[in-house]
């Protein structure tokens, strides 16, 4: 089922067929798509917010959240020329509170509607709302997002506090202009959005931890994305590094994947490492793979660009995860050196 809400309370909702009559030019419209086909493909409702962000928009959105129509983890698609910055930030806080995912996108068209320009633009207050997404997909194709910047390179206090709460560095919105405009708008491309931390394309930052467990060097790589929590641990032992991977995706799904396993493997730079038939286990809510990694191959870990762990079924379909590790190179090197030195000291 899909519906659109705009003026008035959340009870002022209409089916998608009547959306054009509900939308006014001065208020943000909310289209909820939670029909069976949407949920079977996306697994979560798709919410389209379009039009100017008015001061009452957060209250209408929150009412739909409280009613259960907008669920935690929903996909939020934005298309707005801006509006109230305060309201935009309030929407962003609601997105973050609900663990929602932000994208740019146009609302679904009613049946028989003309297929006009389908490019989405999210500017000003809309861009601040976008930053509230726990996971934020970068603009793609002809979609564009415009972030306000400030001539003095300092955002107002309320904006600065909001950016801090959302984990965004003020410097990410510094004007890349000569200063000819007092308050220029920054229109970053997808690569710039990723590099500046404005977008994360569905995954949080990789966390790398190098420590000692019972006197032995240990490395843990951990990343959370919208599908679950994924980690790789290496514990240095004299006979080899104990390699354990965890793909925490829920008990039912973990059991289903392990039940379909033909073989499982660790992966470095998209190449299979330590493959083994039926070597995965379902432990609580995780798919777990355990191997002994040869110490003489640890330099390959230190120089890796990407690592992952996968279970493949008899049809060649694979389930698992991978993450880029170039940003934690120093920790990889520190662990490798400590592990090699530890092994040499006991040889």
Image (cartoon, rainbow, N blue to C red):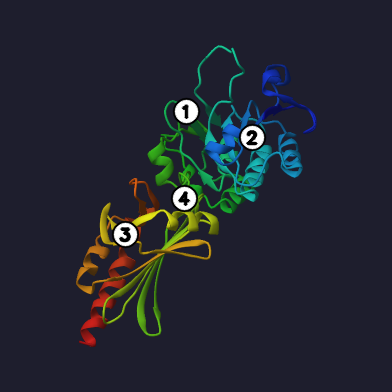
Q: Disc 3 vs disc 1: which is toward the camera?
A: 3
Label 1 Cα neighbours within 10 Å, binned few <14 / some 14-19 / many ≥20? some
Q: Name the residue tied to disc 4.
A: 203
Q: Name the residue tied to disc 1.
A: 143
Q: Name the residue tied to disc 3.
A: 265
| Rendered residue at 47%/48% (across/down) | 171
x, y percentage for residue 40?
56, 38
x, y percentage for residue 243?
34, 69
Q: CA distance from mark 1 to mark 2?
A: 24 Å
**Secondary-structure class at tag 3:** strand
Quadrant, the C terminus = bottom left
Task: Please identify the quarter of the rendering in which residue 77 is found.
Answer: top right
Q: Name the residue tied to disc 2.
A: 34
* Relative horizontal placement of residue 171, taking residue 7 as reference (left or right): left
Q: CA distance from mark 3 to mark 2?
A: 37 Å
| Rendered residue at 49%/42% (across/down) | 173
């Amino acid at each position: 089922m899909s519906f659109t809400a705009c003026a008035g309370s959340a009870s002022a909702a209409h089916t998608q067929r009547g959306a054009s009559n509900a939308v006014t030019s001065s208020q943000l419209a909310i289209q909820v798509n939670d029909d069976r086909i949407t949920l079977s493909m996306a697994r979560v409702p798709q919410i389209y917010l379009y039009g100017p962000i008015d001061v009452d928009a957060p209250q209408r959105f929150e009412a739909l959240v409280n009613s259960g129509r907008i669920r935690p983890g929903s996909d939020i698609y934005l298309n707005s020329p801006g509006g109230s910055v305060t309201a935009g930030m309030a929407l962003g806080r609601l997105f973050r509170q609900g663990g929602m995912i932000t994208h740019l996108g146009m609302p679904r068209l009613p049946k028989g509607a003309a297929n006009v320009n389908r490019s989405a633009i999210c500017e000003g207050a809309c861009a601040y709302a976008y930053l509230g997404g726990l996971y934020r997909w970068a603009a793609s194709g002809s979609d564009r997002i415009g972030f306000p910047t400030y001539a003095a390179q300092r955002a107002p206090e309320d904006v600065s506090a909001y950016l801090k709460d959302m984990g965004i560095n003020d410097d990410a919105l510094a004007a890349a202009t000569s200063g000819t405009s007092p308050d220029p708008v920054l229109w970053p491309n997808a690569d710039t959005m990723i590099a500046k931390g404005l977008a994360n394309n569905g995954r949080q930052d990789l966390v790398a931890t190098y420590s000692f467990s019972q006197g032995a060097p240990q490395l843990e790589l951990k990343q959370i994305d919208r599908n679950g929590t994924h980690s790789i641990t290496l514990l240095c032992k004299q006979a080899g590094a104990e390699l354990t991977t965890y793909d925490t995706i829920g008990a039912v799904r973990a059991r289903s994947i392990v039940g379909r396993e033909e073989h499982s493997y660790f992966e470095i730079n998209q190449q299979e490492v330590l493959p083994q038939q039926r070597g995965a286990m379902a432990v609580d809510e995780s798919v777990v793979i355990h191997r002994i990694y040869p110490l003489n191959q640890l330099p390959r870990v230190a120089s890796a660009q990407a690592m992952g762990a996968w279970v493949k079924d008899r049809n060649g379909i694979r389930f698992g995860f991978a993450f880029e590790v170039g940003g934690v190179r120093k920790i990889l090197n520190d662990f490798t050196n400590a592990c090699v030195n530890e092994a040499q000291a006991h040889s």
